[in-house]
Amino acid sequence: MLYKNKINPIASFAANGTVVWGQKTLQTAASALDRVNARLLINNIVKWITAYGRTVLFDNNSTNLRAVFTLGA
């Protein structure tokens, strides 16, 4: 009933301690982003792109720059 109502249960295990036993977010529409692990991945990707994008912000828009930015080379 908790999981159905978008509440992640908290469970205690002797070997692992206290853990959040679920992965739902509060997003109402079902999608690929309604799980915590997918949302964390997207948040990290945005941070990485933002951090790297700042280093090349005012560089000339060249084929080489686009290749380095998209491939991370």
Image (cartoon, helix red, strand yellow):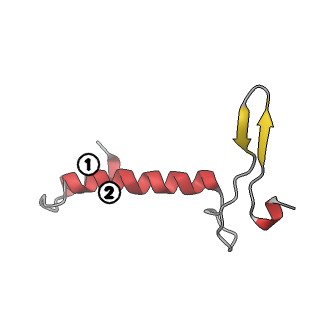
Residue assigned mark 2: 50
Q: Looking at this rendering, what residue extends furthest in the right direction?
A: 1
x then y, percent, for residue 45: 43, 53
Q: Is residue 13 above or below residue 27?
A: above
> On screen, 62 above or below 28?
above
* Front in this rendered view, residue 43 or 6: 6
Residue ID for mark 1: 68
* Quadrant the C terminus occupies: top left
List x then y, in percent, for residue 3: 80, 59
- Image side of residue 48 versus residue 40, left or right: left
Q: Is residue 44 above or below residue 4?
A: above
- The residue closer to the viewer here, 28 or 10, is 10
Quarter of the N terminus within the rendering: bottom right
| Most distant residue in the bottom direction | 29
Q: Tell me the residue at 63%/62% (across/down).
A: 32
Residue type pointed to by label 2: Thr
Image quarter for residue 72?
A: top left
- The residue at the point 79 percent across, 42 percent down is 11
Seen at 62% across and 54% down, the residue is: 36
The spot of residue 68 in percent (x, y) is 26, 48
Q: Is residue 71 above or below residue 18?
A: below
The amino acid type of the residue labelled 1 equals: Val
- In primary-sequence order, the first of circles 2 and 1 is 2
